[in-house]
């Protein structure tokens, strides 16, 4: 199975025959870079790169990555997603583009899909709370409030109203974090910038989930710029935001609970800079390993009757949406059943 590689340190990435060579280096201003021992990466083992440090590369490298269907996702110093290099679209479909556009322009059809996304997200959030409720955390009241709000989803008549309901559900959900986590507190949800450790993990994990969904969309005939819950806008792939809503509770949140309660990530793994709380380099490595471990875990898929990884579930979600848009099969969001 191909792997995702995370590049945390500045360095030089180049092609070396049919291998990729990454050479970490220091970058002190005004001084020549100091090169470290290079690492050779077999290209057949790589699905994509996540780049958190500055990267030196040339067009020959990106031509090679494009040929090998390897994506590269870039993040800035503050862990904000800034963009991706994607291999050439080989699955472009005019029929799919027209179907996506038609479903967006028809309010009833758009709302049907948008409601499904929030239905799946809310269900999976409630499932998380039920999991911890069975383990002695008192979640009954919050679960009841979230279920009551979830029942309002089919009655919403606009995406703004739907997002309002989703916001209230998520507010109760984040309140439960203080009950689930042993040594850390959630506080208010803060994004730009995150102001405490839990918010830093949520923001970082959500960005990884977003790029995971973006890559899965790119491997289907769907266009990532045409979305139904989030308003399509310039300079963002809003369909990835839509699909990520379903998987953030399953992948990101469950990993956060695990790494904090098992003390795999502690206060020493965060830095506070200019009123921001961010994972430091060691913290990032621990967290992304835990995320990757989660993505490689498998479940017995009820419909396919075989083991499927969490990572592959995201691509299956894209296929289900594509079938719905083409009138082949009604879309049903993925819901945890364990």
Image (spheres, helix red, strand yellow):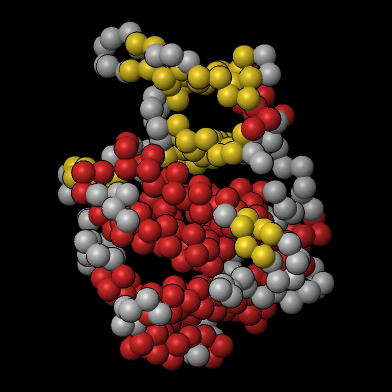
Q: Is residue 336 left or right of residue 328?
A: left
Query: Where residue 82 appears, x then y in whole percent?
Result: 44, 42
Query: Where residue 252 appears, x then y in whole percent?
Result: 44, 58
Between 73 and 102, the one lying in front of the other is: 73
Report the residue that reaches farthest toward the top.
32
Between 280 and 161, the one lying in front of the other is: 280
Image height check: is 143 above or below 190?
below
Numbered label tally: 0
Residue 134 sits in quarter: bottom left
Between 235 and 329, the one lying in front of the other is: 329
Q: Residue at x 67, y 75 (%)?
A: 332
Q: Is residue 171 left or right of residue 7?
A: left
Q: Residue at x 26, y 70 (%)?
A: 178
Image height check: is 159 above or below 58?
below
Q: Residue at x 61, y 17 (%)?
A: 15
Q: Residue at x 70, y 71 (%)?
A: 302
> Which quarter of the rendered picture does the C terminus lie within?
bottom right
Query: Where residue 212 appears, x then y in whole percent?
Result: 55, 50
Whether residue 171 is visible to the viewer of this picture, yes or no, is: no
Residue 71 sits in quarter: top right
Residue 274 sits in quarter: top left
Whether residue 290 is visible to the viewer of this picture, yes or no, is: yes
Image height check: is 118 above or below 32?
below
């Amino acid at each position: 199975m191909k792997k995702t590689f995370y590049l945390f340190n500045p360095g030089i990435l180049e092609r070396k025959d049919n291998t990729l060579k990454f050479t970490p280096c220091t970058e002190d201003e005004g001084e020549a870079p100091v090169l470290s021992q290079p690492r050779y990466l077999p290209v057949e083992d790589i699905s994509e790169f996540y780049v958190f440090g500055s990267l030196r590369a040339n067009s020959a490298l990106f031509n090679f990555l494009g040929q090998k269907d390897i994506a590269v996702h870039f993040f800035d110093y503050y862990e904000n997603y800034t963009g991706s290099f994607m291999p050439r679209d080989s699955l472009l479909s005019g029929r799919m583009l027209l179907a996506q556009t038609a479903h967006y322009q028809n309010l009833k059809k758009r709302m049907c899909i948008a409601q499904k996304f929030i239905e799946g997200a809310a269900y999976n959030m409630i499932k998380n709370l039920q999991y911890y409720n069975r383990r002695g955390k008192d979640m009954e009241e919050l679960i009841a409030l979230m279920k009551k709000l979830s029942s309002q989803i089919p009655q919403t008549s606009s995406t703004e109203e739907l997002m309002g309901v989703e916001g209230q559900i998520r507010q109760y959900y984040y309140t439960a974090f203080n009950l689930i986590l042993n040594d850390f507190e959630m506080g208010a949800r803060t994004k730009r910038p995150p102001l405490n450790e839990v918010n830093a993990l949520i923001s970082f994990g959500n960005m990884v989930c977003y790029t995971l969904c973006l890559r899965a969309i790119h491997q289907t005939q769907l266009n990532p710029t045409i979305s139904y819950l989030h308003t399509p806008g310039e300079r963002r792939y809003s369909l990835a935001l839509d699909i990520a809503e379903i998987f953030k509770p399953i992948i990101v949140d469950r990993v956060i609970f695990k790494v904090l309660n098992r003390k795999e990530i502690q206060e020493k793994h965060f830095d506070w800079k200019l009123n921001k709380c961010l994972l430091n380099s060691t913290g990032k490595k621990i967290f992304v390993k835990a995320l990757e471990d989660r993505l490689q875990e498998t479940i017995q898929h009820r419909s396919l009757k075989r083991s499927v990884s969490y990572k592959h579930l995201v691509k299956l979600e894209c296929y289900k949406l594509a079938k719905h848009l083409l009138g082949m099969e009604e879309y049903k969001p993925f819901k945890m059943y364990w």
